[in-house]
Image (cartoon, rainbow, N blue to C red):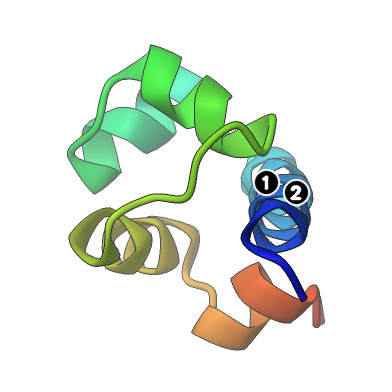
Amino acid sequence: MTKEQMAERLGRNLFLLRRQAGLSQGELGRQAGVSQPKVSQFEQGVALPPLEIFIGFCQALEASPDQLLKGMIT
């Protein structure tokens, strides 16, 4: 899997989990320590988040890394 494919997959899963949690991009960003425009970029697959932001997303969404990376939404 290329970096671009990984960014697209993570972005799609981030979007789905955020919506499932009932959070706006701004709310998720505040909880994870990143701006709303950055959350938008990550959801669009434009960029991959740094590890500390990725961990913040997992914590804010109460999701495992697998759920964000592979789309294993339960």
Q: Residue at x 80, y 73 (%)?
A: 71
Give coordinates of residue 62: x percent, y percent.
Answer: 47, 70
Position in image of residue 63 (x %, y %): 54, 74
Q: Which residue is mark 2?
A: 8
Q: Position of residue 28 (x, y in %)?
A: 41, 36
Going by the picture, which residue comes out furthest to the top? 37
**Looking at the image, do the residues carrying marks 1 and 2 touch, with CB atoms under 8 Å apart?**
yes
Lateral position of residue 65 relative to residue 60, left or right: right
Q: Secondary structure at mark 2?
A: helix
Q: Can you tell which quarter of the image residue 60 is in?
A: bottom left
* Label 2 neighbour load within 10 Å: few <14, some 14-19, many 20+: many
**Helix, strand or loop at mark 1:** helix
**Up/down of 66 relative to 2, above or below:** below
Question: Between 66 and 21, which is closer to the camera in this rendering?
Answer: 66
Disc count in the image?
A: 2
Residue at 72% x, 67% y: name it: 2
Q: Is any part of residue 57 visible from this angle?
A: yes
For label 1, the residue is: 11
Amino acid of disc 2: Glu
Residue kind at label 1, given as amino acid type: Gly
Say if residue 24 shows up in the picture: no
- Quadrant placement of the N terminus: bottom right
Mark 1 burial class by Cα count in 10 Å: few <14, some 14-19, many 20+: many
Residue at 36% across, 61% down: 54
Q: Quadrant of residue 24?
A: top right
- In which quadrant will I find the C terminus? bottom right
Q: Position of residue 70 (x, y in %)?
A: 75, 79
